[in-house]
Image (spheres, rainbow, N blue to C red):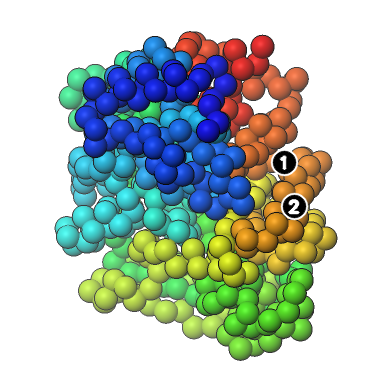
């Protein structure tokens, strides 16, 4: 079994023994099969990031004690909320042999405040749990959910997950955290720094520096409680399905959405999704074509005809008072017409209609069907650059990315979530883990995409654990001054260097010596 750097099997055994004394037998998982359970289930080689095992905390106090034990025994801990970060590493740590700190049993919804529009959750609360709780209370607040909603509300927000709903920038909705620092002390951010302050989860402009975002995509603390703003249920929605017939149409697709988003006429990042992605939710590729190599364009055209798809597909939703959104709908139609995009009929939903009538923050896992695209034991890897919502830049990024997919023989599947200022591209690389030839091609494709995107001048907003150093290295302004600042903060907060070493390319000093 691999042991993490600066640790050995004796230290790991001592850590697990003392964790057992703290937590009892039932919440310590240190057999080889336990380690395999927490490995990256989407990887070709699951041993690459296989942890030694896991320990499951049920309170912030236990998290603090476990961090102290980790420092005492020199064992790295990797926190997960529900561990469903698929495409970016799942529940697995950067370093093989690290111990997973599983928070999925801390799954209480601490508060739902319908008047002020927020909820407070522990890390193990899943999107389904929160949805059920909101449904029980009559759907007065609506959620934003990622495409695959198996994971946790907190873990996803902390990783800056996105959804196609109005509050779809999940990290931006965070307000007020409770965090256990690597040395074991617990802090509350913002207004929560004052005991029992009722403004804990309603303001980010409390006294002093704002710390919430420092715990997103970092390894500076373990979040044990998270406030998240939720949108009030609108009295009505209007939805429009749109299609663009050709691959190169992505440029006018982005040109149409960007000003609508910036001016507030649409209040969510509508995403243009390429047809292969949608086909992969319908069935495996053999359902459409039984050949080898890239899906031929003629078969693609047939799939689009058979299922009424465009090369790119999007849904625009308007939320609010019916008279207001009806007026917005007119403005949207004008903008679309101006860009030569055909708009059909809007679908209207009104309060009281069945809530399942359309896509409105209802958690689903259908998107995971994509991993069956090439048969065998499927997997996927996400490549996610962020760029200005500039149609020419985004179209160039698309063409570059697609050319690389073609070069490495992988069917292109990308989606562009268009904001008023930024566009996030989520490119899924779908593969069959039983095919070693695909393993080499997927790795080469990913490295080419990082280099191409860096050469174009921008970077990823999030990446898989395999590529955290490579992507961190692309943020290189002023000799990597930002990386140096991250490293300094890391050493100050985590002098023993035991919390998630290597996450986001941030390593404790001794690893850098
Ligand atoms: P999800 O449950 O939504 O699938 P994960 O639990 O897989 O999300 O978390 C994704 C990543 O986010 C983890 O690998 C970890 O690096 C970070 N993370 C998750 N939860 C926490 C937390 N409570 N505190 C600090 N970091 C966290």
Question: According to the image, label 1 marks what residue?
Answer: 458
Vertical order, 163 against 488 (above or below): below
Residue 401, horizontal then vertical, whole percent: 75, 56
Of residue 119 and residue 61, the one placed in the foreground of this image is 61
How many C-alpha atoms fall within 10 Å of the one at disc 2: few (<14), some, or many (≥20)? few
Residue 491, horizontal then vertical, whole percent: 52, 13
Spatial CA span between label 1 and label 2: 25 Å
Vertical order, 167 against 1 (above or below): below
Q: Is residue 131 left or right of residue 45?
A: left
Residue 424, horizontal then vertical, whole percent: 61, 51
Visible residue check, residue 260: no
Of residue 29 and residue 294, the one placed in the foreground of this image is 29
- Residue sitting at x 53%, y 27%: 3
Q: Please, what secondary structure does the residue beneath circle 1 have?
A: loop
Question: According to the image, label 2 marks what residue?
Answer: 440
Q: Is residue 389 left or right of residue 449?
A: left
């Amino acid at each position: 079994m691999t042991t993490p750097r600066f640790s050995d099997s004796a230290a790991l055994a001592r850590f697990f023994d003392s964790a057992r004394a703290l937590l009892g037998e039932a919440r310590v998982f240190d057999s080889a099969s336990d380690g395999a359970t927490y490995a990256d289930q989407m990887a070709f080689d699951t041993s690459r990031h296989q942890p030694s095992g896991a320990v499951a905390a049920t309170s912030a106090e236990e998290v603090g004690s476990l961090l102290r034990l980790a420092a005492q025994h020199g064992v790295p801990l990797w926190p997960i909320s529900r561990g469903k970060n698929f495409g970016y590493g799942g529940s697995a740590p950067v370093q093989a042999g690290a111990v997973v700190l599983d928070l999925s049993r801390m799954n209480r919804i601490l508060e739902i405040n319908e008047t002020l529009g927020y909820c407070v959750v522990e890390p193990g609360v899943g999107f389904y749990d929160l949805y059920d709780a909101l449904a029980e209370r009559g759907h007065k607040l609506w959620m934003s959910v990622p495409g695959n909603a198996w994971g946790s509300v907190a873990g996803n927000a902390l990783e800056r997950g996105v959804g196609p709903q109005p509050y779809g920038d999940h990290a931006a909705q965070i307000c007020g955290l409770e965090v256990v620092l690597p040395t074991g002390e617990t802090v509350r951010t913002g207004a929560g720094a004052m005991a029992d302050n009722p403004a804990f989860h309603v303001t980010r402009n409390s006294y002093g520096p704002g710390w919430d975002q420092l715990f997103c995509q970092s390894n500076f603390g373990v979040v044990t409680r998270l406030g998240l703003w939720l949108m009030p249920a609108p009295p009505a929605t209007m939805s429009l399905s749109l299609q663009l017939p050709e691959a190169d149409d992505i440029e006018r697709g982005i040109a149409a959405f960007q000003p609508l988003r910036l001016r507030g006429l649409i209040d969510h990042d509508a995403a243009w999704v390429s047809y292969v992605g949608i086909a992969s939710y319908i069935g495996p590729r053999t359902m459409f074509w039984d050949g080898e190599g890239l899906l031929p364009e003629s078969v693609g055209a047939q799939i689009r005809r058979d299922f009424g798809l465009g090369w790119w597909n999007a849904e625009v939703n308007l939320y609010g008072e019916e008279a207001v959104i009806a007026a917005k709908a007119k403005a949207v139609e004008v903008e679309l017409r101006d860009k030569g995009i055909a708009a059909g009929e809007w679908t209207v939903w009104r309060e009281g209609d069945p809530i399942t009538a359309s896509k409105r923050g209802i958690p689903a896992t259908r998107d995971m069907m994509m991993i069956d695209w090439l048969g065998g034991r499927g997997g996927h890897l996400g490549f996610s650059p962020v760029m200005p919502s500039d149609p020419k830049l985004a179209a160039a990024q698309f063409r570059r990315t697609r050319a690389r997919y073609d070069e490495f023989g992988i069917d292109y599947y990308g989606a562009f979530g268009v904001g008023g200022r930024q566009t996030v591209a989520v490119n899924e690389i779908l593969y069959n883990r039983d095919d070693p030839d695909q393993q080499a091609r997927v790795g080469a494709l990913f490295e080419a995409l990082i280099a191409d995107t860096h050469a174009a001048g921008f970077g990823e907003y999030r990446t898989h654990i395999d590529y955290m150093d490579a992507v961190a290295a692309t943020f290189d302004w002023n000799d990597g001054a930002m990386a140096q600042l991250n490293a300094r903060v890391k050493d100050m907060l985590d002098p023993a260097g035991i919390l998630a070493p290597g996450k986001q390319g941030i390593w404790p000093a001794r690893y850098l010596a």
